[in-house]
Image (tube, helix red, strand yellow):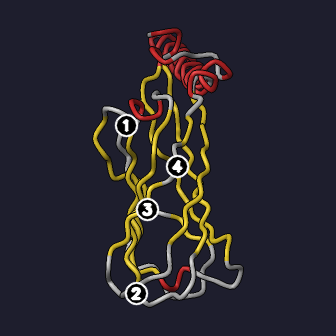
Amino acid sequence: MKRFTFLAGFILLMLSQQGCQKLAKLTQFYISYNSDITIPKTLGIDLPINIVTPDITTNSQNEFQINHTEKKLIDVIRLSEMDMTITSPTNESFDFLKNIEISISADGLPDKKIAWLENIPKTGLKHIVLNVSQEDLQEYIKKDKFVLKTKTTSRELISHDTSIKIHCKFFVDAKILGL
């Protein structure tokens, strides 16, 4: 009888755990943003170049409403992925870049390093995926807008401007029923 009671209790516990996990997934979603930057032709090698994106409007309040939550219920927002793709010139690759570092900035908040890639391989890549920080970025995404600041170091001279599309995807986890 004790075995049956223990087994029944264990099964109920496992089922409730799965139910909580499924419920938690209902309050988890992703928000994506895109921006464009232009890396100017370089004047030297190993010189850092700083580039700031135009303001990126978060539209976070609308995103939260679509996902049935609100700002005050957000538990955490983390950058889950960031990648970059060369859009122009079409024959360019990331071979000219040695390192790249991206920080996020928003009104009243300090700059925070969120993505980077060091020793970019010289293999003709037109698309790269950056390493991302696991820091909570909700204060930045809850703002009306933010800016991405890019710092690059080149390994070779380029005689033309290079246009790049930045794609970033943020994981959002809200509290369940406000708990």
Q: Position of residue 173 (x, y in %)?
A: 50, 28
Label 3, label 2: how many angstroms apart (C-alpha)? 17 Å
Judge by depth and name the residue closer to the eye, 41 or 18: 41
Label 1, label 3: how many angstroms apart (C-alpha)? 24 Å
Q: Position of residue 26 (x, y in %)?
A: 62, 23
Label 4–label 3 contact, CB within 8 A: no
Residue displayed at 60% across by 37% down:
30
Q: Check disc 1 and report its element: helix, strand or loop.
A: loop
Q: Vertical placement of 24 versus 104: above or below? A: above
Q: Which mark is residue 155?
A: 2
Q: Earlier in the sequence, mark 4 or mark 2?
A: 4
Label 2, label 1: how many angstroms apart (C-alpha)? 32 Å
Label 4, label 2: how many angstroms apart (C-alpha)? 26 Å
Marks 1, 3: nearer the viewer: 3
Q: Position of residue 90 (x, y in %)?
A: 71, 79
Considering every residue shown, the one lying at the far right of the view is 90
Q: Earlier in the sequence, mark 3 or mark 2?
A: 3
Marks 2, 1: nearer the viewer: 2
Instruction: State the residue position of label 3.
Output: 51
Q: Vertical placement of 147 versus 46: above or below? A: above
Label 4, label 3: how many angstroms apart (C-alpha)? 10 Å
Q: Check disc 3 and report its element: helix, strand or loop.
A: strand
Marks 4, 2: nearer the viewer: 4
Considering every residue shown, the one lying at the far left of the view is 110
Judge by depth and name the residue closer to the eye, 110 or 70: 110
Residue displayed at 45% across by 40% down:
78
Label 1–label 3 contact, CB within 8 A: no
Q: Check disc 2 and report its element: helix, strand or loop.
A: loop
Instruction: State the residue position of label 4.
Output: 54
Q: Earlier in the sequence, mark 1 or mark 3?
A: 3
Which amino acid does the dot numbered 4 rest on? Pro
Instruction: State the residue position of label 1.
Output: 136
